[in-house]
Image: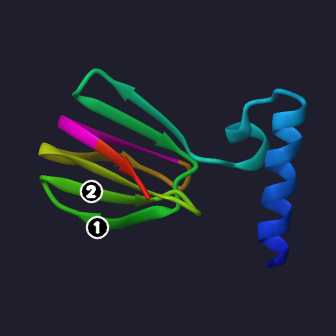
Amino acid sequence: MGERRKRESILERTAEVFDLPGDLVAGLPRIELIGDRELRMENHRGILAYGTEEIHISGGRLVLRVRGEELELRAMNAGELLITGRIRGLELE
C-alpha cells in the first residue's frame, strides 16, 4: 500500500470512529444533486470524459458517471465543479 493510500485509509477510519464527515477529514468527494437539473461535486480529481449525454469525473478511488441529456460543465476549479442539464442517472465505479 502506498504512503498516500495509507494516509487516506487512516483518515477515513478516524472520521468514522469520531463520527466526522469523511469528505472534510479525508478529502473524499462530496456529491450534491439538486433535483434532476444540477450536480455539484467537491474534492474531484478532474474530468475523464465529457459529452452532452455522459460525463465521467474522477473522485480519486472512484469514478462518477453522470448520464443525462444536454449535460454541460458550467463551472470548474481545482476543488469543485458544477454540471447542469437533465440528469437521468449516476453511477459510481
Q: Nearer the viewer, residue 36 or 13?
A: 13
Q: Amino acid under label 2?
A: Ile
Do callouts 1 and 2 mark residues in contact (Cβ within 8 Å)? yes
Q: Where does residue 72 sit, x and y in percent of width and height?
A: 20, 47
Q: How many numbered marks does the figure carry? A: 2
**Of label 1 and label 2, which has the lower sequence position?**
1
Q: Amino acid under label 1?
A: Ala
Q: Nearer the viewer, residue 83 or 12?
A: 12
SS for dot 2: strand
Residue reaching furthest top? Answer: 35
SS for dot 1: strand
Quarter of the image where the N terminus is located: bottom right
Q: Mark on residue 55?
A: 2
Q: Residue at x 52, y 57 (%)?
A: 59
The magenta stretch is: 80-89
Q: Where, by quadrant of the figure, is residue 17 drawn?
A: top right
